[in-house]
Amino acid sequence: MMRDGYVVTWQGREYDAAPDGDRVRIYSGSPEDGFEEIKPGRYVRVLEPDEFDEMSYVRTLCTWRGEPFVVLAEADSWLRLEYTGGRAPVARQLGLEEFDYGVYQGWAPANEVHDRYEHRV
């Protein structure tokens, strides 16, 4: 499993979320009371600040080839990773692409990625 984004706890459940000014939009994959269908299988509800319990940002972290990464995406048996070790020579040695200045990313076989866990901010 991989998550990278906001989550909100509302009525004892955790939902994927997106800040919207002072409000927050929460999303569900099934119909629920008070949610509006925005496309097939995707429902949204807008909450006021006093309606939800907690909002956090969740990232999935891991190690690959002994180095630290953030998991950005999953596709089949591959993971899109972003290097967080801060050493350009190591990133190049790992064969990563320089996605942006000082930002190195690449695809890795999921079975080579270890120590996956969620980090909440």
Image: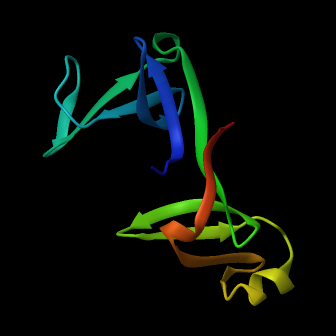
**Residue displayed at 69% across by 36% down:** 121
Q: Quadrant of residue 69?
A: bottom right
Q: Quadrant of residue 84?
A: bottom right
Q: How many marks?
A: 0
Q: Position of residue 115 (x, y in %)?
A: 65, 53
Q: Position of residue 89 (x, y in %)?
A: 85, 86
**Residue displayed at 17% across by 43% down:** 41
Most foreground residue, 59 or 36: 59
**Residue displayed at 50% across by 48% down:** 3
Q: Position of residue 116 (x, y in %)?
A: 60, 52
Most foreground residue, 41 or 77: 77
Q: Quadrant of residue 10?
A: top left
Q: Is residue 77 above or below residue 97?
A: above
> What colour scheme was applied to this rendering of the protein?
rainbow
Look at the image and tell me whether residue 20 can be seen. Answer: no
Most foreground residue, 27 or 79: 79
**Residue displayed at 41% across by 21% down:** 47
Q: Is residue 27 above or below residue 46?
A: below
Q: In this rendering, would 28 be left or right of 82?
A: left
Q: In this rendering, would 105 be left or right of 88?
A: left
Q: Is residue 26 above or below residue 4?
A: above
Look at the image and tell me whether residue 79 can be seen. Answer: yes
Q: Is residue 91 above or below residue 1?
A: below
As drawn, which residue projects farthest toward the front? Answer: 111
Q: In this rendering, would 96 be left or right of 53?
A: right
Q: Position of residue 53 (x, y in %)?
A: 53, 14
